[in-house]
Amino acid sequence: MIKIATQTRLFAIGHPLGMVAMVFILLMLMAGLLAPVLAPFDPTATDTSAILQAPSAAHVMGTDEYGRDILSRIMHGARTAMLLALSASLLGSLTGAAIGIASAYFGGWLDALLQRLMDIMLAILLIVFALVLAAVLKHRMVIGLDLNLVLAVAVPGIPKVARVVRAAALSVRSMPYIDAAQAAGYSPLRIIFGHMAPNLLAPVLVLTTAFAAQAILLEASLSYLGVGVVEPTPAWGLMLSGLGTQVFVEAPWMVVFPGLAVSLTVFSFSLLGDAVRDFMDPRLRL
Amino acid sequence: MNAYLLKKTLQVLVTLVGVALLIFFLLRVIPGDIAAVKLLANGGSLDPQALQAERLRLGLNDPLWMQFLQWVWGLIRLDMGTSMWTGRPVTVEIGERLGVTFEVAVLASIAGASIAVPMGVFAALYRGQAQDHLVRLFTVLGISLPSFWLGLLAQTALLQTFGWLPPVEAVSIWKDPWGHFGQLLLPALIVGWRMSAVVARMLRSSMLEVLQEDYVRTAKAKGVPKWPMITRHAMRNALLPAVTILGLEFAFLLGGLVVTEQVFNLNGVGRLLVQAVAQNDYTLTQGLVMMFAVSFVLINFLVDLLYAALDPRVRAHR
């Protein structure tokens, strides 16, 4: 516990921007998790007497064309976005890391096979792959989380993680202590988990943070295009879907607040990723 | 070099066959039946006989492996079949829309490169100083701001300041070149920003690497003035990885404009994909994905070859 506190303090001193980003992300996460308690209104409740209202004391961020409270929708949207992004980035980067490590450790035909598979996935371009997957898999809700959407966001990001981790794992693999462990007769699993994985924690952590930024953006884009989160679940991309300049001029709050929510969250994850990378290994930042 | 070329060519072929397999079978697990969707959309009722006839006409009753082989055989002859929705050849559907996407991608790359080069170089020269931090902020913003939101902001700003918006209808380049480019400028700039972010970051780190090389120190020592030293000695080598990234990003744009085209109402291949996916149009969707994959893989291949030709170390390593 003390070690974590010291590390956090060091991080905050060396990377104030990264710390601000981390605090913002935690706030968003709290807002999302506590949305059912904290949100002033029901995010799906329509109110014909309060349509398209400008921000006021009652509706801090105004209301949309159905009289739904924007602030409440953004908070519930944070819940959707954060849950999805965190599970997709964990799933995607852990799978990618496993593939990268297996590639580097075993080499040979397994490596060749996995590398070709990653090439194939990369060739289907991230957004195209996610779009097709989301459309094909449709939706499967499990305790408020669309598992199939998680897959659609996680899978296309796997090859990038696998490549970076493979390169890092190759350099760890060539260390003398791996030879020593092999000579001592340790099993491959023990070497991978006990000796290689701890040394790959830093790059995987950085990749996971970047993955989360990308996942938020991807989910918002898919929802915007109409294949991601579906009504009535509140989602940031969905709130912006179909809006034109007309709406912006007449009801700017409908456009500004959800857009800021997406942008600031992605921006924070990106900044945090940068800061974590510098903190973990200053050499990486040439 | 020949062994290298052969190996790379084989890899390209394996990748493309893999993409074809993956996308074909992925699309076949869609639960919706295109034949049923189409009949219902035409206002008809679900007559089992009509449904059967439609399925037969679309070739959906053949075994899957036969459908796949037929498709691949067509691909080799540059025939992607006909769209299941409109009934027109997929190549025609794509051909009509490719121009816009290609133009935006080219304009965005030009914009991206011209922003990225000075930014990357300055960030490297002023490493750790205010300029470096500003560039960093600009690049992180570039990869963070969603294009659908940024597009809306830019359009509204344009409308409010000049009372003008690019026309929604496509304008031919031959009839009205200014109107034509006016329509593409905003999306190109927005996509270019994102692109410049990626390239500038790459250029910054390769510049920093090159600036530490012995030959740069030698140039400095023999009294080459600062700017000629930077542009003629350092940048020449530092640009190589940045150009690689630019090439890959361009390849990515041909399929990656899905969202941007939607925001700016551009009738490109990205929007075509969204429509094809929404309409369960297997043939059009797989044709588009294949087209993106082929251009992505080929541009990658060319960049690799170019790299190997320019930098003998690359050849030796593989």
Image (cartoon, rainbow, N blue to C red):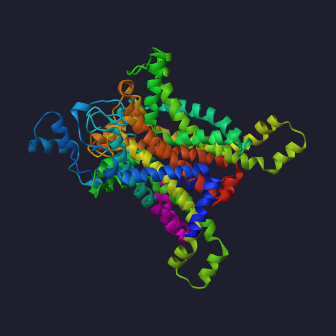
Q: Which region of the structure is painted magenta? A: A93-120
Q: Residue at x 51, y 35 (%)?
A: B191
- Left or right: residue A1 compared with residue A240: right
Q: Position of residue A249 (x, y in %)?
A: 39, 24
Q: Position of residue B60 (x, y in %)?
A: 22, 48
- The verdict on residue A208 being magenta is no
Q: Nearer the viewer, residue A84 or B59?
A: A84
Residue, far bottom: A184
Q: Quadrant of residue A11?
A: bottom right
Characterize the magenta stretch by its predominant secondary structure.
helix
- Left or right: residue B62 compared with residue B157: left
Q: Residue at x 47, y 33 (%)?
A: B150
Q: Position of residue A188 (x, y in %)?
A: 52, 78
Q: Nearer the viewer, residue B265 or A246?
A: A246
Q: Quadrant of residue B240?
A: top right
- The verdict on residue A118 being magenta is yes
Q: Nearer the viewer, residue A197 or A82?
A: A82
- Left or right: residue A19 compared with residue B223: left
For the N terminus of chain A, the quadrant is bottom right
Q: Quadrant of residue B226?
A: top right
Q: Position of residue B85 (x, y in %)?
A: 25, 36
Task: Please indicate, yes or no, whether residue A8 appears anywhere in the rendered image.
Answer: yes
Q: Is residue B3 above or below residue B203?
A: below
Residue, far top: B175
Q: Is residue B164 above or below residue B113?
A: above
Task: Please indicate, yes or no, whether residue B3 appears anywhere in the rendered image.
Answer: no
Residue, far front: A57
How many labels sit on residues? 0
Q: Residue at x 19, y 41 (%)?
A: B37
